Amino acid sequence: SRKCPTREWSLHDFDMGRPLGKGKFGRVYMVRTKDPKYILALKTLYKSEIVQNRVEKQIRREIEIQQNLRHPNVLRLYGYFHDEKRIFLMLEFAGKGELYKQLSKHGCFSERRSARYIDQMADALIYLHGKHVIHRDIKPENLLLGINGELKIGDFGWSVHAPGNRRMTLCGTLDYLPPEMVEGKEHNEKVDYWALGVLTYEFLIGNPPFEDRNSVSNTYRRIAKVDLRFPSNVSAEVQDLISRLLQYDPQRRLPLTEVLTHPWIVRHRPQGV
Ligand SMILES: COc1ccc(C(=O)Nc2ccccc2)cc1NC(=O)CCSc1ncnc(N)c1Br
């Protein structure tokens, strides 16, 4: 079939809207294409910062990986363009914004809401791992919500091709790191299984399982020891799921396909799905 011409985009093609948030490397704006009128999120990355952080190679690799990703629970990267100072990423606009804002507003989510998010996360991760993409940075701050409340894995600042063992500057929170990364060992896509367990815990309880707000080294220790404790009001069923994901040995972590068939997930699936 005739290949659609990949036209060169430029800032002149857009009407600028409101700022959506401040990412690690730049600002994100809600924008609309002029003709046809199409809403999307435009992320600006400053080349100066990228060069300083020596991530230009990574960005190029990221962009080519992500332009080929198509999944309802993975935020689309439609394309990109650049001017002399900046790189612009043309992203899908997530109509209900950042999930972590909902989490901090509510404190924690109900079992039903948590199970539906984890169901969607597992589906998205199966897809990404099928493309040999490990996300490596799953946490509430990187999740967005579509206009119908569907979850979207929304930020890929650190995804790599499996298996990776690049030294990762621990810029963000440690709470989601698995023992093998805390111990600087070789890691593979099973790091995302661990993070899914941490995410499930945080959705239900409101804080990650190994958090120690006063001591980073104690958080490390608790992760390496898998020092997992549940408050009383957590159902035995979801304790089972979380415990099967938060296994020290990556090989013993519950396969994502078995997350989708776990009773806690199945019980909360919307009727007829
Ligand atoms: C596919 O989504 C991405 C793909 C790539 C990168 C990225 O920065 N890569 C990268 C940057 C530097 C170095 C290496 C990689 C970032 C995103 N995503 C984002 O930045 C999310 C922007 S916030 C937002 N987006 C839509 N709707 C909303 N309502 C909001 Br709020």
Image: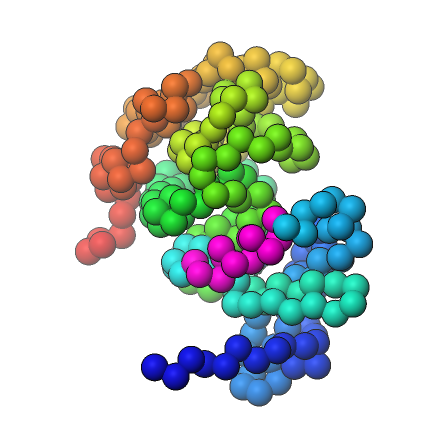
Residue at figure coordinates x 34%, y 24% from the top left: 251
Residue at figure coordinates x 52%, y 22% from the top left: 185
- 217 left or right, relative to 159: right
Q: Which residues are magenta?
A: 58-69
Residue 136 x %, y % = 51, 38
* Quadrant for the C terminus in the image: bottom left
Residue found farthest to the bottom:
35
Is 252 situated above or below 202? above
Q: Between residue 174 and residue 61, name the one nearer to us.
A: 61
Q: Between residue 106 and residue 253, name the one nearer to us.
A: 253
Residue 144 x %, y % = 52, 53
Residue 61 x %, y % = 56, 53
Residue at figure coordinates x 31%, y 29% from the top left: 254
Q: Between residue 182 and residue 32, name the one nearer to us.
A: 182
Q: How is the image coloured?
A: rainbow
> Which quarter of the frame holds ligand 1?
bottom right
Is 177 situated above or below 113? above
Q: Main secondary structure of the magenta part?
A: helix
- 52 left or right, relative to 126: right
Residue found farthest to the left:
272
Residue 200 visible at all: no
Q: Residue 64 magenta-drawn?
A: yes
Residue 66 x %, y % = 49, 57
Q: Which of the 4 image quarters holds residue 28?
A: bottom right
Q: Between residue 46 and residue 265, name the one nearer to us.
A: 46
Q: Residue 103 magenta-drawn?
A: no
* Quadrant for the N terminus in the image: bottom left
Residue 20 visible at all: yes
Residue at figure coordinates x 52%, y 62% from the top left: 77
